[in-house]
Image (spheres, helix red, strand yellow):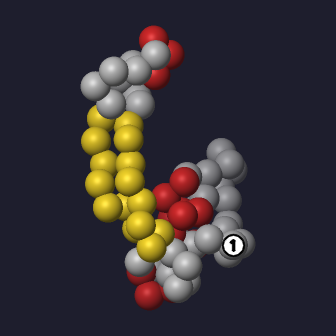
Amino acid sequence: MYLAHLSHPGEKLDYNEKGFPQESSYADESSKSTQALIRAAHWKAERTFKGGQGTDHVSIWKHA
């Protein structure tokens, strides 16, 4: 979900019945705003709290 919002900041996104942004509302690379962020790095966290084990990841974002 955060990927849709960070790549299209301030834009209205369409959501599906489960509450997630519909891919069709953000998948078009040419529609990204000049304020869009892109993920520069992404990795799985080596250490995390018990509740995040197996699901926590770290991302670094930068302006496009």
Image location (x, y in percent) of residue 57:
38, 37
**Residue 40 in the figure: left or right of residue 12:** left
Query: Label 1, on which residue?
Result: 10
For disc 1, the neighbor class at 10 Å (few under 14, some 14 to 19, many from 20) is few
Using the image as rendered, state which of residue 38 and residue 22 is in the foreground: 38
**Residue 12 in the figure: left or right of residue 23:** right
From the viewer's perspective, is residue 59 above or below residue 29? above
From the viewer's perspective, is residue 7 above or below residue 40? below
Residue at image x 47%, y 69%? Answer: 37
Image location (x, y in percent) of residue 9:
62, 71
Residue 43 visible from this viewpoint = yes
Residue at image x 46%, y 16%? Answer: 49
Residue at image x 38%, y 48%? Answer: 59
Residue at image x 30%, y 35%? Answer: 44
Q: Quadrant of the C terminus?
A: bottom left
Could you tell me which secondary element the residue under label 1 belongs to?
A: loop
Circle 1: residue type:
Gly
Using the image as rendered, state which of residue 47 and residue 7 is in the foreground: 47
From the viewer's perspective, is residue 11 above or below residue 34? above
